[in-house]
Image (cartoon, rainbow, N blue to C red):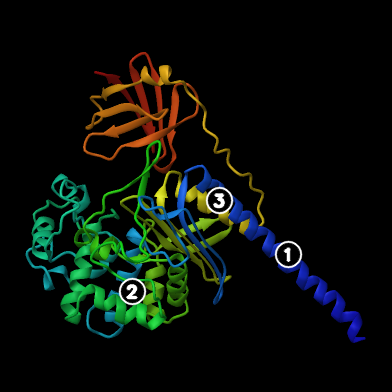
Amino acid sequence: MKKSYIIPLLFLAATAFAQADAKFARIDSLLTSFNKHNKFMGSIALREGDKIVFAKAYGFSDIASRKLADTNTKYKVGSITKPFTAVLILQLVDENKIKLEDKLSKFFPKMRNAEKITVEMLLRHRTGIHEILADPVTTQNITRSHTRQEIVDRISGYASDFEPGDKYQYSNSNYILLGYIIEDVTKKSYAENIQKRIASKLKLTNTSMPDKIDFSGNDAISATFDANWHVTPEWSNTLAYSAGALVSTPSDLTIFIKALFDGKLVSAASLEKMKTIQEGYGLGLITLPFDSKTFYGHTGGIENFRSVVGYDPVSKFGASLSMNGDNYDRNLIMQGVLAIYYGKEYKFPDLTEFTVSEDILKKYVGTYASADFPLKITVTTQGGKLITQATGQSAFAVEAKSENRFEYRPAGIVLEFSDGKMNLKQSGLDINFIRE
């Protein structure tokens, strides 16, 4: 009797492993293809329960030295820092050291509308506090160090964008202030709080808040593609700070997000508040839907790093992708990974680029302006590519889709040229430019 059951069970187990190996091999092929076609450099981790079932790095951690990345390479994760900041705040709430109803005036009385803004409003981006990274003074000095007082004074000087509580509007200023509140309540630095309250507790050996990229260590440096990969200048972490300056790995991020939902970081009541979404945002969490499933997590972007982490508490499946070379839509890459993982029908995208002759490309060179757009856009050619650059912003190569139509997928930009004119489409915008 035993033999008649053992053989089928062994066969079924072998089949299941073969199917798992096949889907992970296909995910590997997809990411290898993106990397081979200069669309992506980065790292991925997929977690089932307590086990990492697939993890791999692609491309270089440092394009200048051609140093290959590995699964312990650390990436700046941008706004994925915000769930960490939210956890620290809610830990202090659980410890009765702070209340979600506490007014901002308790910590920063000179801040505009401080008597109307609560800690919970900061967490939910419902304050009306202006985005510091939308300030030209900030962006023009984004690589230099800033003092806390300088940043507080700058944020305090902004007019309110709307009445506190009226609506949701994402602003990094909110989470920078939350980081300072954490420091004031605990009498320890934000970096120390991350280490003591989260990283050490969960044994996140690759997660920290550095002053800057450690070139001697295994930190990734981000790169921008314009005919070739080029190092992207590093921002000062004093600006991104508790809103976006953490470094981590995809594996560490999946540990963090699972531990949060396992009740290892905050109370059940606090987690429930984090999960409560208003106008697309909770307390440091967003939802990331895929098919019929709902993932909780966050996305992030800083310099040319792009990251995402998501967790499905029903199946206990977590996924994280971190990129230091962003030349394709991160969401489309992740959707491809998940489609393959869940056995959905999925066709690899055609990453071959339409070839446009140098003579035709030169016809589009020039500076374009529009009365409906505040910036001028300069178009040049380099290495058989069309390069675009808006005033005061980084240059990037656009991908040819026909002789006169070009795309930049990471930002959803489509450009079409005709007779000294250029049309730009992006996120509902449809603007006509004229060459000067």
Residue pointed to by mark 1: 18
Residue pointed to by mark 3: 32
Residue at point 26%, 78% (across, down): 193
Residue at point 77%, 67% (across, down): 15
Does residue 103 appear anywhere in the picture? Answer: yes
Which quarter of the figure has residue 180? Answer: bottom left
The quadrant of the rendering that contains the C terminus is top left
Residue at point 41%, 80% (across, down): 202
Mark sitting on residue 87: 2
Q: Position of residue 298 (x, y in %)?
A: 40, 61
Residue at point 58%, 50% (across, down): 30
Q: Nearer the viewer, mark 3 or mark 2?
A: 3
Does residue 100 appear anywhere in the picture? Answer: no
Say if mark 1 contacts mark 3, CB within 8 Å. Answer: no
Q: Position of residue 216 (x, y in %)?
A: 31, 65
Q: Position of residue 46 (x, y in %)?
A: 54, 65
Lower sequence index among marks 3 and 2: 3
The quadrant of the rendering that contains the N terminus is bottom right
- In the figure, 142 relative to 310: above or below? above
Query: Residue 412 versus residue 402: which sits nearer the camera?
Result: 402
C-alpha distance separating marks 2 and 1: 39 Å
Secondary structure under the numbered disc 1 in the rendered image: helix
Secondary structure under the numbered disc 2 in the rendered image: helix
